[in-house]
Image (cartoon, rainbow, N blue to C red):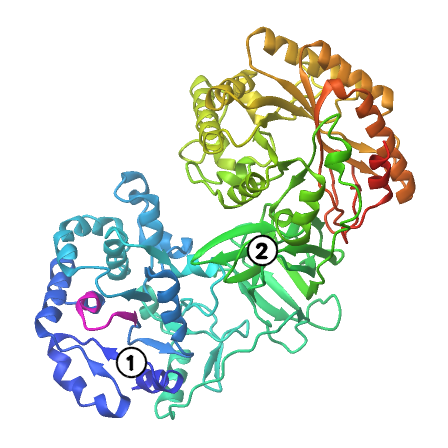
Amino acid sequence: MPFLNSFRRFNPDVPLCLIPFADDVEGLTALRERHRFSVFTDIDLLRTCEAIGLELRGKALGHYRKLVMWEGPFEEFVYIDSDAIVLHGIDFAFELLADYGFVTAHGDDPLIREHVWNDSVYGAGVLTWKQIAFSGATGFIASRRDCLRLDDVLDRLPQAAELLPHMCPHVVDQPLLNYLMVTSGHRYASLFGLTRAGVEHLPLERSAEAVLGVVRDGQLVSADRCPTLMVHWSGPVKESTDTSHLEALREFYRNRPATPDDAPDDAGTSCTFEDGSRQGWRPREGGESCVVTTADAHTGTSSLLVTGRATCWAGPVKALEAEPVGSTCRFAVWVKLTPGEPASRLRLSIGRHLAGTAEFDQVTKTAVVTPDAWVELAGTYTVAHPVDFLSLYVESTSGTASFYLDDFTMRRLPRPSIEADIPSLKDVLAACFPFGTAIGTHQIVADHAELVLKHCASVTVGNALKWDAVEPAEGHHRWTDADAQIGFAGANGLAVRGHTLVWHEQTPAWVFRDDTGAELLPAPENKQLLLRRLENHIRAVMGRYAGRISAWDVVNEVIDETEPEGLRRSPWYDLTGLDYIRTAFAVARETDPAAKLYLNEYDTTRPARRRRLAALVHRLRSEGVPIDGIGHQMHIAVDQPTATDIEDTLRTFTELGLDNQITELDVSPRPTGGGAAVSAEEQGRRYGEVFVTFRLLCGHISSVTVWGLADNPDNLCTFPHTGTDNPLIFDERLQAKPAFWAIAAT
């Protein structure tokens, strides 16, 4: 009765069908008229489901009654156990069905998973890791007719029975049912996974051992003041002696009239938490806590306290409405670590969600945050792809520090316009070398795309081809951003540089770990494993774009002139010596013979680094390693290097028979070692001096690429020169700076 009253209060028009035990069909039918529900009355099907419980567990159990839903009269449905109290409408579930179309179950919470499966299942190979993750908890199910066939379940009962010794005695039936769904061959996802992807208003299971809070105006209000959608009692939770919160719910709903509740409001574009609510922020993973507190605040008296983070990406997330392609927003939020936490690096990131899949972008540079002071995370983001919605979240690069969050703002920026009547740099410089820029997804839409097309003959894919972007897990590739950027170039007749196949940075941790997750140590078998992964990665990435990318930065930043061998002591070098460089170039040449292959390096104008690099390349080429040229990054300062340094560097490698490309040029307005920034005019004179040198040596250079066209003051470079703000040739409004005119005049 409490369940029926609460359900009808918040869901007055949703069709409700009760699934009883076969012997209870007659008793339930007497209540149908008052509460407007139907009863599943196919006795044969109900007894078949009870027989499954008898075979697996020796008794008829309610969990297996769920199987009749896929044989029943409904095209789509949501299953809610009768021991759940529904506190909000469930229309969202039918939207999930339309958007995702899965069988869904609540199953990839690591704490619940460890409770369900005994340790032996992890090493026995009985289940795959995906099956373990997705069949590890009690379930809330949304599905469609015919997604799961009862005959198929019956055929696999012996297989399911073999899992029983690997399971906690108190939590068996729903995970077994989840396992049967996982292995049915249909699309399957977990509610935790969907929550992480940014879907709002999903039910999160709460245990009786947790602090649930109190009932207030028809809602169970949890300790963090977030109304819980569904409370689901299962497994050892049913043995809890603390039932006060459940009794309170029963009492509240016993004779409560059926009136729909108001939907929660959204906080809009700013959040200060002064009203005591979370204002749309919620836990991203589900296990962490996001609670409004008065313990500290950036302004006012309240902030959001984030604790209990199990992973570096866990933390607060806020769903945002879809923004049109080409629109730009500026986001800012203040963060501070809680007392006693060690310094941590935090950043603001965003998820873009379309048709049930999610891609993730970084909005701000990482910032060092401590318990001593509030730090602002601020950055701009341009929507470059169609989205259903966005999700903004704060994460750390490592660790799980607790922190406060306050004073969030989101501001939509007006679209800038480019100057159409100024010279095109690609035409000005065409007689000497092609001129290009690095791009990301933001540079291929709207006015940024117009700026690229007006001034550039080539583009470098700045981040979307790096290992962590394209292969975050072994064999699992994300091509969306790279496809879009390379497609943009192809559609507009631009040459493409690929950046980069091998680097000591932005390489996922799995690359340097074995199949058990242990760090690879120097050993012949580990060397072979790493080189095999490298080969597979290069073949996958270069093979996909063969014929569409004319030049590749195959290996990036290998020199360290302070080491005895002159080589960076990266995991690549420690595990393979020089063989990772040899392998990378050999496989690259084999995969796309037409592409030019470069070793890309920074500070090549410094004599010590230049000598080390020249010696390395001379040695490798004498062995037959197919290195076509050197990529000179040229992240330079307003005072260094000199024109002579640049000339000496380019001539050195020309004399070795190598091509030279300038790959990442920008000019910091600050002098070497830091100090006050010079004027834009002085920065422009420096750009002019550099391009005069390039023109004089145009026979030694086959292309010049700047590391972006327009400044973004929210995203400052930190390496190799710290504090390099506004280093590019157009300002943030896409207007030409003195640097542009200095280049055009050379």
Mark 1 residue crowding within 10 angstroms, few (<14) / some (14–19) / many (20+)? few
> Which residue is under mark 2?
350
> Residue 244: where, in percent of width, then height?
41, 80
Is residue 22 within the magenta segment? no
Q: Residue furthest top?
A: 622
Based on the displayed image, in which of its 4 quarters is residue 643 positioned? top right
> Residue 540: where, in percent of width, then height?
44, 31
| Residue in the image at 71% along x and 37% along y | 707
- Vertical placement of residue 248 versus 131, above or below: below
Asked whether residue 232 appears in the rendered view, the answer is yes
Numbered label tally: 2
Is residue 72 within the magenta segment? yes
Asked whether residue 673 appears in the rendered view, the answer is no
- Horizontal side, residue 683 vs residue 4: left or right: right
> Residue 504: where, in percent of width, then height?
60, 30
The amino acid sitting under disc 1 is: Pro
The magenta segment is: 67-78
Based on the displayed image, in which of its 4 quarters is residue 204 positioned? bottom left
Between 12 and 86, the one lying in front of the other is 12
| Of callouts 1 and 2, the N-terminal one | 1
Rounded to the nearest angstrom, the CA distance separating label 1 from label 2 is 37 Å
The amino acid sitting under disc 2 is: Ile
> Which residue is under mark 1?
15
| Residue in the image at 27% along x and 39% along y | 124
Between 254 and 540, the one lying in front of the other is 540
Q: State the SS at label 2.
A: strand
On the rendered image, what quadrant is the C terminus found in? top right
Circles 1 and 2 in contact, beta carbons < 8 Å: no
